Image: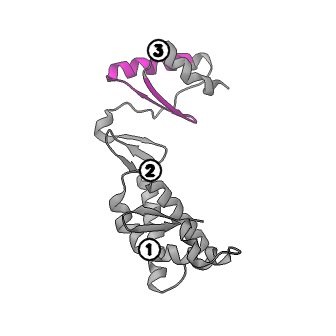
Amino acid sequence: GVQTCALPIFKEDLRIKYAIRFMDDYVIFANSKELLHTYFYKIGEYLNDLELTIKSNYQIYRVNVRGVAFIGYRYFRHFILISKKTLKRMKLLCRAILSKQSRKELISFRQWSGINSYIGCLKWCNSYKLKSKYIKPILTSIKNYYWYNIASKKRGTKLKSMRKYCYKLYHNLYLCIA
């Protein structure tokens, strides 16, 4: 409905050069705070005509100071960081896997799929140090789960031929995927 067509109208009528929309989140970039306040006022008027409102906790700030928090990442001019909330959950999972690894236990399917999901998230941000510190120590557990629970159950395949399901994560670190 109304929300899906709102951004193109804003961009055309107000001549907004840089704007991003994902679901109900809008990010608008400009060279000055004054211009952003002008956009905000005019967009507010437009939405009032449609009986809609902008949330009260909107923010206008300098992007180069703290970056833009959007879709689980913090975007800066020259690098991307994963959000703190996601990082906390990943660290918790890595510690749980590490404790199982020290007891020489296999991890659960939930842990294996969860850590693979976090590895996928790390792929899209600057995370070399995070991978070295948290993923590399538990890589043995990740591989063992894959080899014992997934690769061994595939029909007509030998474990040695399963290497094609591995891809290079970085340098000499490999991650197995199903």
Task: Give the quadrant of the N terminus.
Answer: top right
Residue that numbered label 3 is attached to: 14
* Amino acid type for the residue under numbered disc 1: Ile
- What's drawn in magenta, residue-wise? 18-46
Task: Name the residue at the left extreme.
Answer: 65
Task: Find disc 1 in the rendering and name its residue.
Answer: 138
Q: Quadrant of residue 91?
A: bottom left
Query: Label 2 to label 1, Cα distance in Å?
Result: 20 Å
Amino acid type at circle 2 is Trp
Quadrant position of the C terminus in the picture: bottom right
Residue 125 inside the magenta-drawn segment: no
From the viewer's perspective, is 1 left or right of 130?
right
The image shows residue 57, relative to residue 51, as above or below, that is below
Q: Which mark is residue 124?
A: 2
The answer to which quarter of the image holds residue 94 is bottom left
x 43%, y 47%: residue: 73
Q: Secondary structure at mark 3?
A: helix
As rendered, which of 107 and 178 lies closer to the eye? Answer: 178
Q: Is residue 8 above or below residue 144?
A: above
Relative to the observer, which residue lies in front, 133 or 96?
Answer: 133
Q: Looking at the picture, does residue 105 appear above or below residue 62?
A: below
Q: Residues within 10 Å of mark 3 (few under 14, many from 20)?
A: few
Q: Position of residue 49 (x, y in %)?
A: 60, 15
How many C-alpha atoms fall within 10 Å of the one at disc 2: few (<14), some, or many (≥20)?
few
Coloring applied to the structure: one colour
Q: Earlier in the sequence, mark 3 or mark 2?
A: 3
Q: Amino acid at mark 3?
A: Leu
Neighbourhood count class around disc 1 (C-alpha, 10 Å): few under 14, some 14–19, many 20 upward: many
Queried whether the magenta region covers residue 28, the answer comes back as: yes
Please, is residue 125 above or below residue 50 in the view? below
